Amino acid sequence: MVNAAGKFGPYNQAVPAQVGGVWDTRVLAGRGPTGAELVRSRIALRIRLRSVAPGDRLPDAGVLAEELGISEITVRRALEAMCQDGLLDRRRGRSGGTFIAADWDTVVAVLHDADETASLESFHLLLECGLVAHGTGEVPDGRLDGLRTLVEELDLAEDPARLLELETRFHLDLAEALGGVGIREFAADLLGRQCLLGPAPAPSVVRARNRCHTDLLDELTRGAMDPAVRAVKAHRHAGLN
């Protein structure tokens, strides 16, 4: 039985500001997700990135707490709530621990919320348009090489799970390339929430979006801000018509 109270509320986080031309993530202090929401979103993101899979054992609460920069008691409470929601399983004994539920996808589908997903996607679009507008013409040589490699890998991928993994990595790496590590963490929270609250795009949609990735990187390399921003906007609707 899924506990609807475990779902995320509307995303009302402020966009990171710029101070002296540098993205300032201090605006996130006190305005970001709760510790419990952070645990949920990051576990969902790890599943999308295939670093863990349904049936896998999660790291101990202390390890997760250190990785996420929150208290261990907060992590324990978040994991317990996810067990109550059916997202995780708690097993006792010497080989016990906290495991990703075998039916993770089925349980997550119950949590889907079209309105909240649209809100998250709009916010993510705003973030990436801002990053692109800020970074166009100032991206150092070689900074986009890793992103181009992801685009090439995505073109060759056949496995739907691999397609989703590569697209998610692209957006995380794009955030870091244009805004730094702090903005990557900000994007990770957005993407993790989207993994929980919205259905995964079909492979055909991911492939169509990848053409927008290519256009974006080409325009960033040319230093063409307006076309680069248009490529970001086109990504949202690619493959949906």
Image (cartoon, rainbow, N blue to C red):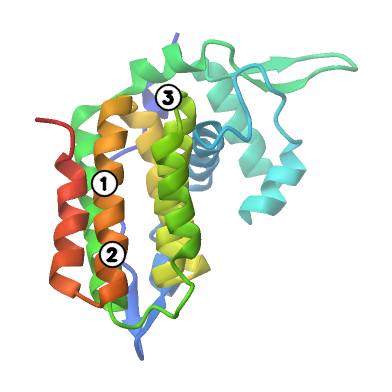
C-alpha span from label 3 to label 2: 26 Å
Closer-to-camera residue (135/211): 211
Q: Which amino acid does label 3 sit on?
A: Pro
Residue occupied by mark 2: 218
Q: Position of residue 155 (x, y in %)?
A: 39, 39
Report the residue at 63% width, 30% height from top.
Answer: 52
Q: Earlier in the sequence, mark 2 or mark 1?
A: 1
Q: Which amino acid does label 2 sit on?
A: Asp
The secondary element bearing badge 3 is classed as helix
Q: Position of residue 148 (x, y in %)?
A: 43, 56
Closer-to-camera residue (73/53): 53
Classify 197 as above or below 153: above
Report the residue at 69% width, 22% height from top.
Answer: 56
Residue occupied by mark 1: 211
Q: Classify residue 139 by image quadrant.
A: bottom left
The nearer-to-camera label among 3 and 2 is 2
Classify 241 as above or below 188: above
The secondary element bearing badge 1 is classed as helix
Report the residue at 63% width, 56% height from top.
Answer: 69
Residue count near mark 2 (Cα–Cα under 10 Å), binned few <14, some 14–19, many ≥20:
some
Q: Classify residue 88 by image quadrant.
A: top right
Q: What residue type is labelled 1?
A: Arg
Residue count near mark 1 (Cα–Cα under 10 Å), binned few <14, some 14–19, many ≥20:
some
Residue occupied by mark 3: 160
Q: Where is residue 143 in the image (x, y as percent from the top left)?
A: 47, 71
